[in-house]
Image (cartoon, rainbow, N blue to C red):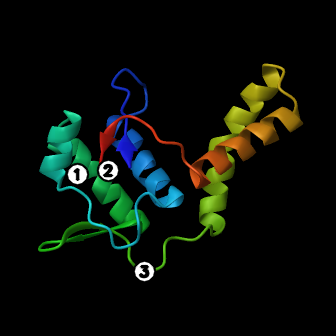
Amino acid sequence: MFVELDLQSEVPIYEQLADQLVEGIASGMLAPGQALPSVRTLAADLGINLHTVNKAYQALKQEGFLEIHRKKGVIVQPGPLPTADETFKARLRRDLRPLAAEALVRGMNEQELTELMQTLYRSIQNPPSEGGTSL
């Protein structure tokens, strides 16, 4: 799995990191039970503050994507991963609504938006080789 952070983005770095870790899990690049780098190691590799990595790891632990053990370290959840329950679907609708509205304002039609979403979904299922920091 590769991590690329945009330090100029308006999206907080910990959110970028958390999003990319979830994408790694979704794509199969990070397997259930796989160990992740320690907070200090990943922070050093990415050139970011260790508290930023810790915040991303803690957020993913709370959401059920990671387990954090004193002796084993950080691992991808070996058991069942979180499901697309109604709470998740409500959050997804809330997050996608402004993007759908902007796409409409900018002249995209429903088919273009749907095709874009399908392309993104499929690219996560079958990721191309990318550059970045390897986990």
> Image point 18% across, 42% down: which residue?
43
Residue type indicated by callout 2:
Ala
Q: Residues within 10 Å of mark 2 (few under 14, many from 20)?
A: some
Q: x%, y% of residue 34? A: 32, 68
Going by the numbered disc 1, the residue's amino acid type is Asn
Location of residue 110 with respect to 36 vertically, above or below: above
* Front position among marks 1 and 3: 3
Q: Which mark is residue 79?
A: 3
Which residue has dot 2 on it? 56
Q: Disc 2, disc 1: CB below 8 Å?
A: yes
Label 2 element class: helix
The answer to whether residue 54 is left or right of residue 31 is left
Q: Is residue 115 left or right of residue 61?
A: right
- Residue 126 at x, y percent in the picture: 59, 52
| 86 over 55 or under it: above or below | below
Image height of 14 relative to 112, above or below:
below
Q: Which mark is residue 112?
A: none
Instruction: Judge by depth and name the residue closer to the eye, 93 or 112.
Output: 112
Q: Position of residue 69 (x, y in %)?
A: 19, 73
Q: Which residue is mark 1?
A: 54
- Amino acid under label 3? Gly
